[in-house]
Amino acid sequence: MRNGIEFKVYGDYALFTDPLTKLGGEKLTYSVPTYQALKGIVESIYWKPTLIFIVDEVRIMNPIRMESKGVRPIEYGGGNTLANYTYLKDVCYEVRAHFEFNENRPELEHDRNEHKHHNILKRSLQAGGRRDIFLGTRECQAYVEPCVFGEAKGFYDNYGEIHFGTMVHGINYPDETGKSQMEVRLWDVKMKDGIISFDRPEVCTKVRTISEMQPKVFGASNMESADELLARMEAEEPI
């Protein structure tokens, strides 16, 4: 796919929190990663406000297993609460994603250099990402590396369809939608032979408004163009 990348992300644990379980102070993971969690991983590899990343597919490589742990949440008012968090264990996913230019950022039109952004993205993936990678929550450290999507053997190959019901798809932020509000998207998840093909954010019909929000302002004073960034990277470590 144009401007696309394919990568493997893996770690010992993952926690893609079902928001319904947070009301009582406990956390229970979804069985599979959400679109927003995978988008966050891609943006940890490389992100600029000029771009919008679209996650196309995820492939579940290992069997879905869970493990519960007793955790003492931080309570700034004091207390000694013990909560049970249920994590996914020994996870590995293959992800296919691509970027498009953010049409809601006309002030960044000068930074729409497709070729250079794609080169920086691939270089950043090869280096393991520009920021820390984690699976759902900060304590679930993960690692990324390039791969060929579908090449390796997966546990759910030829497994058939599995339905996971309604899950959070992701969050609509003002700088990506042009609206002055933050919204949450829901969708019905189906996995076929270990692969989940995501609906694009704009076609999700189950959308709920969370709060009013204004987009952050970017410009020459607080961001680097693709030309400047690639030139600096080449000077530090020639490609």
Image: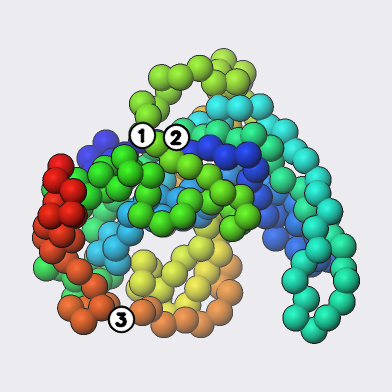
For this view, does 213 lie left or right of residue 12? left
- Figure label count: 3
For this view, does 230 lie left or right of residue 201? left
Counting residues from the start of the chain, the first of labels 2 and 1 encountered is: 2
Which residue is at 56% across, 49% downward? 141
Counting residues from the start of the chain, the first of labels 3 and 1 encountered is: 1
Q: Quadrant of the N terminus?
A: top left
Where in the figure is residue 75, as x and y percent of width and height? 78, 76
Residue situated furthest front in the rendering: 236
- On residue 146, the disc is 1
Looking at the image, residue 107 lies above or below residue 5: below
Q: What residue type is labelled 3?
A: Val
Give the Cα separation between the discs numbered 3 and 1: 32 Å
Q: Can residue 129 be seen in this view?
A: yes
Give the Cα separation between the discs numbered 2 and 1: 6 Å
Q: What residue type is labelled 1?
A: Pro
The residue wearing badge 2 is: 8
Q: Do the residues labelled 2 and 1 touch (CB within 8 Å)?
A: yes
Pick the front one: 99 or 189: 99
The residue wearing badge 3 is: 217
